[in-house]
């Protein structure tokens, strides 16, 4: 099982954002989609999520052809850099939201929300409003909300990009531990080489709408596919 991207292209006017991209993202692993700004990372993630349509090609998610499925039928959870929480709802109600709109029974929702808050270490904060959380805590709430509906795939677009370096590092370690607990197939967009190398099992390097390489952090360092990858990763520190 995997996320299979086959021959996906996307243009905005004359500009080619994705140029015949084919890549296989392995199931159950934490994969970083790494590349410079403007490389096509968010566009590819949005196409996997169904938030954007590709001009051509196919997207398969865990064995299901998702190319023509709307986002809500893809069973994906997302977290973005600037998380749009419901400001007037408690943390609890924010996390419960996806379950409520799916009309799950009340006691099932309550139990599941307890579990999720514990998973992201916010069990003390359920009654607060999002504004009463730190930036790092808010992104953990966003993760709990994305996981609430038990997605087969978790998609994160520069989720820690707006936070300061220390919190970013904490959340990075924390995402790694969370992934080791839940093992959900995760695709994590970042332009930060160090972040990708530290957190990911696999790294997909994308630049100017093309995949430059896919491999483990060690593969990329030991056998960079081309000059771009070598330069972009920089010296090992
Ligand atoms: P990344 O996330 O790697 O920084 P994006 O996928 O956001 O890159 O964008 C890739 C390229 O496509 C950029 O040059 C961007 O300006 C362009 N682009 C993205 N979305 C749109 C859009 N809706 N309209 C026009 N151009 C876009
Ligand atoms: Mg982006």
Image (cartoon, rainbow, N blue to C red):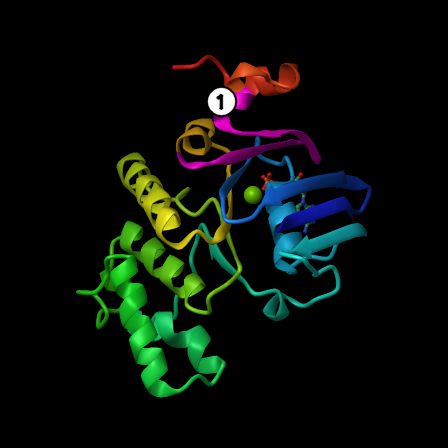
Can I make out residue 88 in this image? no
Q: Residue at x 77, y 39 (%)?
A: 16
Which quadrant would the C terminus be assigned to in this image? top left
Can I make out residue 128 in this image? yes
Asked if the stretch drawn in magenta spans residue 217, the answer is: yes
Where residue 114 appears, as percent x and y from the top left, is: 27, 71
**Viewer-closest of 14 and 33:** 33
Q: Secondary structure at mark 1?
A: helix
Q: Residue at x 29, y 50 (%)?
A: 136
Residue 123 vs residue 49: left or right? left
Where residue 4 appears, as percent x and y from the top left, is: 68, 48
Q: Quadrant of residue 209?
A: top right
Q: Is residue 111 above or below residue 208?
A: below
From which residue to which does the magenta span run? 199-220
**Viewer-closest of 115 and 136:** 115
Q: Residue at x 63, y 35 (%)?
A: 39
Q: Is residue 89 above or below residue 130?
A: below
Residue 225 vs residue 236: left or right? right
Q: Is residue 114 above or below residue 209?
A: below
The residue carrying mark 1 is: 218
Q: Quadrant of residue 65?
A: bottom right
Asked if the stretch drawn in magenta spans residue 98, the answer is: no
Quadrant position of ligand 1? top right
Question: How many callouts does the rendering have?
Answer: 1
Where residue 3 appears, as percent x and y from the top left, is: 63, 50
Question: For the view shown, which residue lies furthest in the left direction?
Answer: 124
Q: Residue at x 47, y 85 (%)?
A: 103
Where residue 84 appears, as percent x and y from the top left, is: 43, 62
Residue 180 vs residue 122: left or right? right
Within 10 Å of the Cα at label 1, are there few (<14), some (14-19), or many (20+) other Cα atoms?
few
């Amino acid at each position: 099982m995997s996320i299979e991207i086959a021959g996906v292209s996307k243009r905005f006017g004359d500009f080619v954002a994705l140029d015949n991209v084919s890549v296989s993202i392995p199931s159950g692993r934490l994969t970083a989609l790494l590349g410079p700004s403007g490389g096509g990372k968010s566009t590819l993630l949005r196409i996997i999520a169904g938030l954007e349509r590709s001009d051509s090609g196919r997207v398969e998610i865990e064995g299901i052809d998702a190319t023509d499925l709307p986002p809500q039928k893809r069973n994906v959870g997302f977290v973005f850099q600037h998380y749009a929480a419901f400001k007037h709802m408690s943390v609890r109600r924010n996390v419960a939201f996806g379950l409520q709109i799916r009309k799950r029974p009340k006691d099932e929702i309550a139990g599941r929300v307890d579990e999720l808050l514990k998973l992201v270490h916010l069990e003390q904060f359920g009654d607060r409003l999002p504004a009463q959380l730190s930036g790092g805590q808010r992104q953990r709430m966003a993760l709990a909300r994305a996981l609430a509906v038990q997605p087969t795939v978790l998609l994160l677009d520069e989720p820690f990009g707006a936070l300061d370096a220390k919190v970013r590092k904490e959340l990075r370690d924390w995402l790694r531990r969370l992934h080791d607990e839940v093992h959900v197939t995760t695709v994590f967009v970042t332009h930060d080489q160090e972040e990708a190398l530290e957190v990911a099992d696999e790294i997909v390097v994308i630049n100017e709408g093309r995949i430059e390489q896919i491999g483990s952090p060690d593969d990329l360092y030991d056998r960079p596919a081309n000059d771009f990858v070598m330069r972009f990763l920089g010296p090992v520190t």
